Amino acid sequence: MNTIAIFLESKKVRPTAMRLLVYKYMAQSNVARTLGDIENAFAKADRTTLYRTLKTFEEKGIVHQVDDGTGTIKYALCEAGCNCDIGRDLHLHFHCNNCRETTCLTEHKIPQINLPDGYIAEDMNMVIKGICEHCSG
Amino acid sequence: MNTIAIFLESKKVRPTAMRLLVYKYMAQSNVARTLGDIENAFAKADRTTLYRTLKTFEEKGIVHQVDDGTGTIKYALCEAGCNCDIGRDLHLHFHCNNCRETTCLTEHKIPQINLPDGYIAEDMNMVIKGICEHCSG
DNA sequence: AGTAATCGTGCAATGGAAGTGCATTTCTTA
DNA sequence: TAAGAAATGCACTTCCATTGCACGATTACT
Ligand SMILES: [Mn+2]
Ligand SMILES: [Mn+2]
Ligand SMILES: [Zn+2]
Ligand SMILES: [Zn+2]
C-alpha cells in the first residue's frame, strides 16, 4: 500500500483506484483545478464520481475549494496543517489574468480587518488578480 | 425631467422608463442585488432587458458588480466618486450568513498586500462573511 | 463461506444563471 | 416625416453544479 493510500486512510477516506488517481493528479498540480480539469485528465472516469470524490476530499479536509471569481469552483490540496475546515487557514489566492491559473499563496494570510459596529466576521475570501510569477518573467 | 434622468444623462445613458425604474430600485436597496432580485421586483419586465440594463449601467460606471461568492453576480450602485471602472475603488464587501444580503463597505478599502516576487497585482476582491449589523442586534 | 449492510460508481436528468441572435418597437435627429 | 440608431422582447443556447436511482464492489457479521 503506497503512501497516498495510507494518507487517505488517515483521513478516513477509503483509497479506491479513482481516489488515488485524483489525489495524485492534485498533488502534481501546483495550481487549483476545476472539476472540468480533472474530467479532462481522466476522460474515462465519470463526471459524477469525480464530483463526489472532490466533495469527499473536501469534507475530510483533504482539499479546499478556491473561489477565484471566474465562476467555476476550483480545488487545491490542503497543505499539512491546513485548517480550512475550521476557517482558520485564511490564506490568499492569486489568479493570473494571463495564464488563467489560480494559485494558493499559503504563506500569505488575509489581513485583519476592523469592521464597523455590529458586523461579526466568520469567514473571508480574498483573491488577487494580476500576473503570476511564471507569466511576469 | 427628474433628478435620476438627469443623472443618467450625465453618464451618457438614455433615461428610458425601464432604466429609471431599475435605477430607483437599486437606489432604494441598501444591499447588492442580483438580476433575479430585479426580475422579481419587476415581474412584467423582460429578463434580457434588465440584464442589458445592468450591463449598460456597469459600462457607464453607474453600478459595479459584486462577487460575494454565492455564485450569482450582484450589483450595487456606485457611490459618488467611485472609481470601480479604473480599479481604484477596492472596497470590501460583506455577506451576511443569516439574512444572505450583501453590503458594500464603501469606507473600508482592501488592505495593501506584499506579494511574493514575480507576482503583479492588477485587481483584487475581498469578501467577509458573517453576521451583519441588522442580524447581530 | 454466506448474507446483509454499506459504500462507490455510472448514467440520466434537472436546475439555475449567464449569455446570444434576431425580429420588433421606440426614440432621435436631420 | 422619414431614415437611422438604440432599446426591448422572445427564443435559444451553454455551462456548470447537483441529484435520484440503479448497479457493482467492499466490508462487517454470523
Ligand atoms: Mn488555497
Ligand atoms: Mn461595492
Ligand atoms: Zn500566469
Ligand atoms: Zn444579515
Image: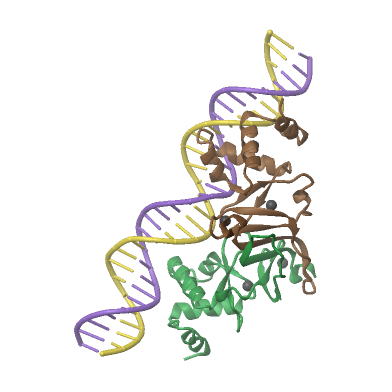
Chain colours: A brown, B green, C yellow, D purple
What x and y, as percent, mark residue A122? 77, 60
What x and y, as percent, mark residue B15? 45, 83
In the image, residue D9 sits, relative to residue A38, either above or below, namely below
Residue at the outermost bottom position: B1
| Residue A68 in view here | no
**At 56% from the left edge and 39% from the top edge, which residue is drawn?**
A48
Placement of the N terminus of chain A among the 4 image quadrants: top right
Can you tell which quarter of the image residue A5 is in?
top right
What x and y, as percent, mark residue B79? 61, 81
A116 left or right of B62 in image: right
In the image, residue D1 sits, relative to residue B41, either above or below, namely below
**Could you tell me how many numbered marks the image carries?**
0
| Residue A21 in view here | yes
C27 left or right of A35 in image: left
**At 68% from the left edge and 53% from the top edge, which residue is drawn?**
A104
Residue toward you, A120 or A132: A132
What x and y, as percent, mark residue B20? 49, 81
**At 61% from the left edge and 32% from the top edge, which residue is drawn?**
A18
In the image, residue A1 sits, relative to residue A58, either above or below, namely above
Residue toward you, A135 or B66: A135
Placement of the C terminus of chain A among the 4 image quadrants: bottom right
Q: In which quadrant of this rendering is ligand 3 seen?
A: bottom right
Residue toward you, B15 or B134: B15
